[in-house]
Amino acid sequence: MIYKDLRRSIIVGHRKPGERLDLDVLAKGYGTSVTPVRDALQMISQEGLVTIKPRSGYFVTRVTLKQLDDMLKLREILELASVELASEKITEEQLDQLEHVHAGYTGEDDESYDRYMDENRHFHYLIAQSSGNQELAETLGRLHDRLVRFMVMCRVGATLESRHALIIEALRKGDATVARQVMLNEVDETRETILEGVIQESGSSWHLKVPDKKITMFGEKALPGDVICPG
Amino acid sequence: MIYKDLRRSIIVGHRKPGERLDLDVLAKGYGTSVTPVRDALQMISQEGLVTIKPRSGYFVTRVTLKQLDDMLKLREILELASVELASEKITEEQLDQLEHVHAGYTGEDDESYDRYMDENRHFHYLIAQSSGNQELAETLGRLHDRLVRFMVMCRVGATLESRHALIIEALRKGDATVARQVMLNEVDETRETILEGVIQESGSSWHLKVPDKKITMFGEKALPGDVICPG
DNA sequence: AAATATAAAGTAATACATCAGTTACCGCGT
DNA sequence: ACGCGGTAACTGATGTATTACTTTATATTT
């Protein structure tokens, strides 16, 4: 439970990169001792979301621009392979699931933004699963988790719905070429949006020492005014 | 230290899949308490090498034939992307490093087999790094770590040297097409060797213990027909 | 004389050990 | 074959030690 909650709070951007994660504070917040919190942080650090400075502390991992660019390029490789394989192997049932997830896309009011990102993740994860290669799906999912906070920060997602519809259509036809091309467009657009947004923000408060130590345990929403620092 | 040592012992196949990892025994072995061992196992489990059954125990992860096949296909995707990017971006210094690692390949006497696999890993990791994408390199490296034990088991590696020389040659020329093709051949050959070897071995000493209860991560189901590799 | 750098001491956080408790598994008996 | 009990393993808590960071004081340099 602690693992999932902590991980989610980092992924969606409630915890900012560079922020210190105090064992005692977290333990108090969850009403447990530090041991489960330690275990959770150790696990999360293996996914690259948390950095451990021995004898010093736990911190939300800071990401450099190069790392971000690398992640986005890797995502492109994996998403393209994924959609290509899926166009051959996807089943009717999986197509229906895709449609269902896609239909869940509502407006982009701020309060539903978290759910929106969840569904975007779900959409891409479903395609990866439809490739028939679970390893590919898991790898892509983990990568996606590390990218979501930047998507949230840069308000990626405004123009995703139409592309998603096109992808579903191409997959239904089994047209690998079109599916691949549309996916390439979406991934490229997302990449550019993120990189531009991040570069723009870079002057303000990229490396920071968070003065406000507000630490809330459960379900805090990302407010419009929140400055989310890439590190 | 414990993390690295335990991880290595699993990767090289010293610990067999399905084997129980007793906290107390390991702690005694390292001369510490169980806490550091716990931390190490938690971390290793995030890489998929160890499976945790809550309130029951820690076990070296068993791999199904499907999972193995998925991993090998994913490896193909990543290795091809890797060598393709590297053919454009690789530097003279990196080429020299590749030559040096390649030259380190000696015979295949059994006692140097571990070192041999280390060097094979190093070779592919260097190429991935030469792609300029560190994320790609690390993802491929993690995947490779999960595959090494099967390579060792199936004595993959006999005919790798000549292909490696061809790859270096193609990279030096910047010939992406040839490099890609040779890499494809090597990866395919490795895959077939592993799958054949695994299927052949499946009758003898593969399951050390009960085949009815299977331990898998991510809650996926074990199909009755699944061959459980090795141990 | 003032400012900066360095060193030392104190504080705060993690890492590890020990202990208590719960649970699953195995064997025995019915 | 089913159920019950015992044992052994993991999980979580508490306490202790080690380490890193911060602050302060002193000395040196400008």
Image: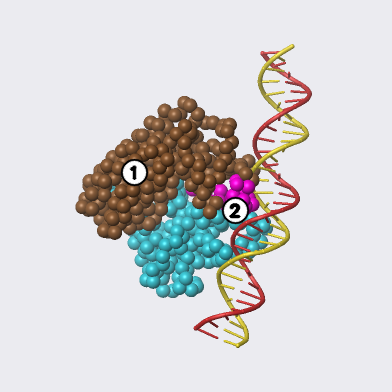
Chain colours: A brown, B cyan, C yellow, D red
Q: Which residue is mark 1?
A: A106
Q: Residue at x 36, y 34 (%)?
A: A193
Q: Is residue C21 left or right of residue B188?
A: right
Question: How would you rate the neighbour count of disc 1 (Cα within 10 Å): few for under 14, some for 14-19, many for 20 or more?
Answer: few
Q: Is residue B141 visible?
A: yes
Q: Quadrant of residue B93?
A: top left
Q: Measured along the vertical axis of the image, is residue B108 above or below residue B223?
A: above
Type of amino acid under label 1 = Thr
User: Which secondary structure type mostly characterizes the magenta part of the structure?
Assistant: helix
Q: Residue A78, how many percent across, how many down? A: 35, 47
For label 2, the SS is helix
Question: How would you rate the neighbour count of disc 2 (Cα within 10 Å): few for under 14, some for 14-19, many for 20 or more?
Answer: some
Q: Residue at x 53, y 61 (%)?
A: B52
Type of amino acid under label 2 = Pro
Q: Residue at x 64, y 52 (%)?
A: A33
Query: Counting residues from the N terminus, which is met first, the one under dot 2 or under dot 1?
Result: 2
Q: Residue B147, how many percent across, how many down? A: 43, 57
Q: In this rendering, do the residues under marks 2 and 1 share a single chain?
A: yes
Q: Nearer the viewer, mark 2 or mark 1?
A: 1
Q: Which residue is mark 2?
A: A36
Chain of the residue on which disc 1 is drawn: A
Instruction: Out of B208 and B225, give the one closest to the viewer.
Output: B225
- Please state the extent of the stretch shown in magenta in the rendering: A26-47
Q: Residue A206, how many percent across, how many down? A: 49, 30
For label 1, the SS is loop
